[in-house]
Image (spheres, rainbow, N blue to C red):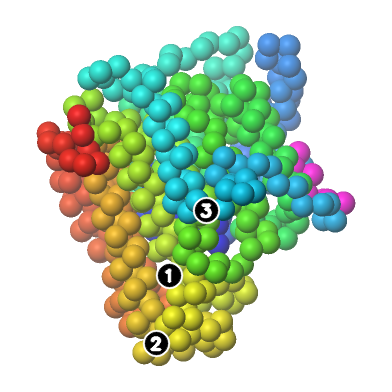
Amino acid sequence: MPVALLGIVTPNSDVSTGFGFLDSVREGSRLFDSSRLLTRDKGVSGNNRVRKGRKQRWCCNSPTGYFFDHSLGVSGLDRGSKFSVLSSMVAAPAGDMALTSEQKVYDVVLKQAALVKRHLKPGEDMEVKPDIALPGSLGLLSEAYDRCREVCAEYAKTFYLGTLLMTPARRKAIWAIYVWCRRTDELVDGPNASHITPMALDRWEARLEDIFKGRPFDMLDAALSDSVSKFAVDIQPFRDMIEGMRMDLWKSRYKTFDELYLYCYYVAGTVGLMSVPVMGIAPESRATTESVYSAALALGIANQLTNILRDVGEDARRGRIYLPQDELAHAGLSEDDIFAGKVTDKWIYFMKEQIKRARKFFDEAEKGVTELSSASRWPVWASLLLYRQILDEIEANDYNNFTRRAYVSKPKKILALPVAYAKSLVPPSRTSSSRMKA
């Protein structure tokens, strides 16, 4: 039950879910046919290009497509490999277990906010570094961004339209982040998921390190590498998303909400942290950078909790329960009740409490959307409003999320778009508060 992505998905994969685009990654991964895009190589696939003396492997027409390639080493030989966990900033060292997951994650929020503030000047928007022209590279880079655009346009339609209001540099960077998150999610939730091992994810993380060092493996990596060189994007949220994929390889139960919160951060909250530097904070905003990042994190958490509540029946059929076990027990429910899939008074009580919690995270997220750059607000508002409506649909289905999938109808989506646009026109607050201060 990985990624709820940046906030770009809808139940039928056309709305975004987070500070930009998360759930479409999860939704579209089962439908995405990468070969349609990658086989149109325009004369670049299959060739090795040399950049600064290093041989680049542009795997454009790999038979495994966009999200799965031989470089990860996911053959049967890896299946018996020892589980290798790369350390994460969020993972608490021995003796540090007193910290809650929220406290651990907030440390990451503070570090991301500090990184952005170092790139800001008073009263100015986030700096975007200019293109660095390398001989023979511009054509490939343009092609890479075109592929990213096509993926976003097909599988995150509503969010994609909103990105067209952004500056060219910002929208291209968002497309590149979207595709990387999608490829990452596909590793554990796609057609080749049964062959993915911890070693394969270690190799994917090593590839990520190369992306941030300016050594992309393929064209899509090149788009992200170019983007992170222009914005104050830190590598840690990307690492943490991979950590969430590792978690899905071995963990299918969560004892408490504290455990579940950390998982939601890994697979969805990270997307908000990735995207804030690209979305930009409005120059006139009086909010603290930390508060905007916290709102982005809250939106990712809210989206993933919504995914979990929507997909209870689907996940149970896969042997997974993404619900706090202690809270199930408090409501008088057990795993057997989940697998039985019957809507009872106890289940309704439990679901009402879970929905209430998810809505609180959405409320927290709303505080930060208005503080974003004006051109970035509409797609985020659209994703927030549309995704939040899934909770309403669960209620409309009489809390039967075992056999009925909650989704937002097309007319409701259409009606939500002008509301989101009107909200995007509201400027940042001119007053400060305990969390939003000058």
Q: CA distance from mark 1 to mark 2?
A: 15 Å
The residue identified by callout 2 is 346
> Is residue 105 positioned above or below 328 on the image?
above
Using the rendered view, name the quadrant where residue 41 is placed: top right
For mark 2, give the secondary structure. helix
Q: In terms of secondary structure, what is the magenta stretch mainly?
A: helix
The answer to if 77 sits in the magenta stretch is yes
Which class describes the residues within 10 Å of circle 3: few (<14), some (14-19), or many (20+)? few
Q: Earlier in the sequence, mark 1 or mark 2?
A: 1
Number of the front mark, 1 or 3 = 3
Residue in the picture at 34% in, 69% down:
355
Question: Which segment is the magenta one?
Answer: 71-78
The answer to if 305 sits in the magenta stretch is no
Using the rendered view, name the quadrant where residue 279 is placed: top left
Q: Earlier in the sequence, mark 1 or mark 3?
A: 3
Q: CA distance from mark 3 to mark 2?
A: 32 Å
The residue identified by callout 1 is 309
Residue 136 is at least partly visible in this image: yes
> Is residue 311 positioned above or below 7 on the image?
below
For mark 3, give the secondary structure. loop
Number of the front mark, 1 or 2 = 2
Q: Are marks 3 and 2 in contact (CB under 8 Å)?
A: no
Q: Is residue 329 left or right of residue 196?
A: left
As drawn, the label of residue 98 is 3
Which class describes the residues within 10 Å of circle 2: few (<14), some (14-19), or many (20+)? few
> Is residue 276 positioned above or below 415 on the image?
above
Q: Earlier in the sequence, mark 3 or mark 2?
A: 3
Residue 239 percent across, percent down from the top left: 59, 40
Q: Amino acid at mark 3?
A: Ala
